[in-house]
Image (cartoon, grey):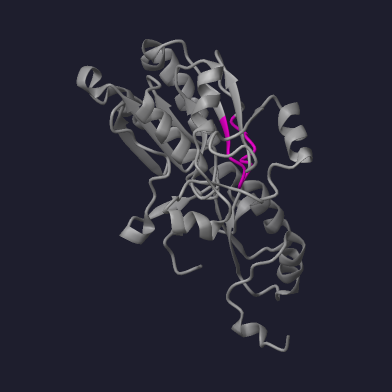
Amino acid sequence: RGIDAGMVTFLSASLQEQRRAIAACPDACPLYFTGSRPVAEGIRADKARAFCSTGGPNTLIATALGDEIASAIQISATIEHAGQCTALRHAVVPCAEAEAQAVLARAPTATSAPHALVRGEFSAILGDNGKGNSGQASQMLAAGFTQVTVAESADQGAVYVRHSADRLPTPYLDEHWRHATVDFTAPPDAASVRSPSWISSISQWLITAQPISVAVNDDVSREDFGLARSVFERTAVVVFTAGTLDTPALTCQARPQEGEVFGEVPPRRELHAHTRMPVIVPSPSP
């Protein structure tokens, strides 16, 4: 349209147009990207000077599924239509499969992003988003997920839940960026979650998966913060938050607008496949 390319600072376009714009940038021009690790890896393969701020399988751990914990899981999973870097992808909490599905079914909906803003909703499932199409649903169902329609509106969007009663999922989870998707790992009871063997297993999982954000919630009136401390001391994640069953911590805790500084860093062994250098947010690179 005759605009000096040096004046362009923001582009909203289809993936095909985004890739065309990236390819048109000179090799010496650095590129900043925020999104999922798989997309960052694809960009990095084509753009050596790509600085990518990536998400990961952010995890919430709780020893019981009460109403407050259910709300914390739902908000963390659906924040910005599952489009924030600290959005929940994995929940560890004793629960039945039907209970896990009910957690995500309680998500609010909105017809569009402006509609969500008017309603004051920051964790709504957006209608007309192209994410609930039959092809996507077929892929998710084939991978063992259950498609759950949000209770507020049967014709707007869907969320996906996969439940396992006895084992952790692979740490190499597809993030399903902009798809509200949660793997539930359900130990039998609170004592199991607090057991040394389980703490060792989930800690090793977190080290391998290296999410940005982990939230741990327990009945601290009886147990203090022992569970959170044990997981914290055995892992190294950027955003670690401890809460209670009544006032739970969410994974979507990062608030750079209030001065918090955090990193969006993939596992070290994979670092250069995703980004030229680690990204610390907020930073001068965006």
Q: On the rendered structure, is 256 left or right of 148?
A: left
Q: Residue furthest left?
A: 221
Q: Nearer the viewer, residue 16 or 197?
A: 16
Q: Quadrant location of residue 224?
A: top left
Q: Residue at x 52, y 57 (%)?
A: 115
Residue 264 x, y percent position in the rendering: 49, 51
Q: Is 6 a magenta residue?
A: no
Q: Which residues are magenta?
A: 171-182
Residue 98 x, y percent position in the rendering: 55, 18
Q: How many marks?
A: 0
Q: Quadrant of the N terminus?
A: bottom right
- The correct choice, above or below, for 177 with respect to 165 in the image is below
Residue 97 x, y percent position in the rendering: 56, 18
Residue 26 x, y percent position in the rendering: 70, 76
Per the picture, the main secondary structure of the magenta-coloured stretch is loop
Q: Quadrant location of residue 16?
A: bottom right
- The correct choice, above or below, for 59 with respect to 226 in the image is below
Residue 181 in view? yes
Q: Nearer the viewer, residue 136 or 18?
A: 136
Q: Residue at x 38, y 58 (%)?
A: 256
Residue 195 in view? no
- The correct choice, above or below, for 31 with respect to 75 in the image is below
Q: Residue at x 33, y 33 (%)?
A: 248
- The correct choice, above or below, for 215 with respect to 16 in the image is above
Q: Nearer the viewer, residue 211 or 160?
A: 160
Q: On the rendered structure, is 203 left or right of 268?
A: left
Q: Is 181 a magenta residue?
A: yes
